[in-house]
Amino acid sequence: MTPSKLEEQTTTPPSAADAEFTERPYSVYTSKEKWFIVTLVSFAGIFSPFTANIYFPAIPTLTSVFHKSTELINLTVMMYMVLQGLSPMFFGSFADFHGRRPIFILCLFVLCLSCVGLALVPTNAYWLLMVLRCLQATGSASTIALGAGVIGDIAVPSERGGFFGFYSLGPMLGPALGPVIGGALSDGLGWRSIFWFLCIATGLACIIMLLFLPETLRQIVGDGSVVPGPIYRPWIPIISCHSTAASNFKRPPKRKFKNPLLLFKNLDIVMLLFFNGIVYSVFYAVTASISSLFADIYPFLNDSTIGLCYLAIGFGTAAGSAGAGKVLDWDFQRMKKVYIETHGSKSMKTESNDLGDDFPIEKARLMSMSYSMVVLVATGMGYGWCLQKKVHIAAPLVLQFIIGALSMAVMNPTQTLILDLMPGQGSSVTACNNVVRCLLGFTYVLLNGIIVISMPLLYLVIELGPRFRKKRREADVQTLVARS
């Protein structure tokens, strides 16, 4: 039940302004403006995986110049992953409460400063290398969660799949492009050039955000028509200000800070996070092991050509993200048409302007995934077999492309559904997703076996999800009644 409907039943009939509010679109941004915003956050989102993977080619050099064992240098990778999982829990939740734009800029600024420190770190200060890598992870990791929150702010479910598919291009191209650029920089200009490159790139991204990114958090700007304070406004307002309708807009009440860990109390969310984390582990197991496995199995490869091998899975993720977004929007429209024929068009009107309480959003998002999952499992197992048998390099590269594409076809629907189920907490729930991902890591066959075992979780979400969603909505209504 929406707040306006609650007022109608408990107090007086809605005013003319309230009636106009219910007819307003979810966001006043035009389609082009939404795509521009999603492009900005996708560009910023690339730095979390990119910063992690560009470091890999320099590991042998760092063991030499710092006079440390490979295990100790790999410890900097492990600590990066730990902070990569934990820091979005703080920054993502903070962004759900205090705004996307300032947290985006803060994270990129911290990342830029940490890269300057890493470029200048003395080779006799291993402890400083460790500290700066942790600081680097803290700055970079939250950008993915922040971008997901932005999409939840500006997009209704009917268009969210396409936006999320395009947004995923940035974060998922990072693991493919990072080693290529890192290997070329390390071989040509030395290992410090990697961090100078990151410093320049993140500094540029920070400036772009300052210049162009508007605030989107609905508690601050509503549907985009409320003019926020100076820190929330872009320096160059390419996106036009829609403040002319602000007087008719009823801004949502300011919410209290919510502990993101409380999201794990929702069984349907936990099932989705677990399944998504397992699939991501398959994807990360492939990307993280390419350099070491290919160097051993195909000794004719050097550092530069090994880096080029990452492009196969990178192009696969790009194709998969674009295709998954279109399929998600198509599935949603198909389910919406069936729902309207059964319940009538008025049943679709809520504060999101797109969904009724009993709309089967879980089925709309997940019903086309089974085919992709079956092929992904078979491809993952085939990839491991090809490497074990040391077949021609073309075979694993083709399978990498397929794994990248199908991983996106499986992960994007679950991630989009999580945003649908937790409106207003897009950054927090994506941060929880990131934690689960970083905690999971196994081998190829075991991971694909776990995918098979965990597939029933998706059907449980389809069956049980509406009940949990209804309970959350009833709890929200009770909270509104208690406050009124």
Image: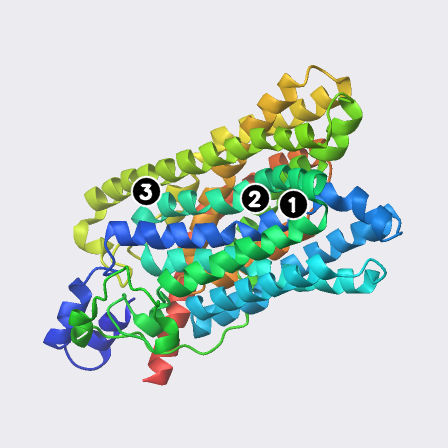
What is the crowding at mark 2: few (fewer than 14 residues within 10 Å), some, or many (at least 20)?
A: many
Quadrant for residue 291, please give it. Answer: top right
**Cβ–Cβ below 8 Å for labels 2 and 1?**
yes
Residue 376 appears in view: yes
How far from the left and from the top, in percent, is residue 154?
32, 58
Residue flagged by tag 3: what amino acid is it? Answer: Phe
Which residue shows up at 77% across the image and 23% down it?
297
Which residue shows up at 58% across the image and 39% down it?
177
- Which of the pair 408/60 is nearer the observer? 60
How far from the left and from the top, in percent, is residue 236?
32, 64
Q: Furthest-front residue in view? A: 189
Residue flagged by tag 2: what amino acid is it? Answer: Gly
The numbered mark, 2 or 1, whose residue comes first in the sequence reads: 1
- Which of the pair 68/41 is nearer the observer? 68
How far from the left and from the top, in percent, is residue 339?
26, 44
- Label 2 to label 3, Cα distance in Å? 29 Å
**Cβ–Cβ below 8 Å for labels 2 and 3?**
no
Instruction: Say if 323 sits above or below 412 in the image.
Output: above
What is the crowding at mark 1: few (fewer than 14 residues within 10 Å), some, or many (at least 20)?
A: many
Comparing marks 2 and 3, which lies closer to the viewer? 2
Which residue shows up at 27% across the image and 66% down it?
224
Q: Which residue lies under the disc numbered 2? A: 174
Could you say which disc has been placed on residue 332 in the image? Answer: 3
Residue flagged by tag 1: what amino acid is it? Answer: Asn
At numbered mark 1, what does the secondary structure look like: helix, strand or loop?
helix
Instruction: Say if 164 sits above or below 397 in the image.
Output: below
Could you say which disc has been placed on residue 273 in the image? Answer: none
Q: Is residue 265 left or right of residue 476?
A: right
The numbered mark, 2 or 3, whose residue comes first in the sequence reads: 2
Q: Is residue 466 left or right of residue 454?
A: left
The numbered mark, 3 or 1, whose residue comes first in the sequence reads: 1
Could you say which disc has been placed on residue 53 in the image? Answer: 1
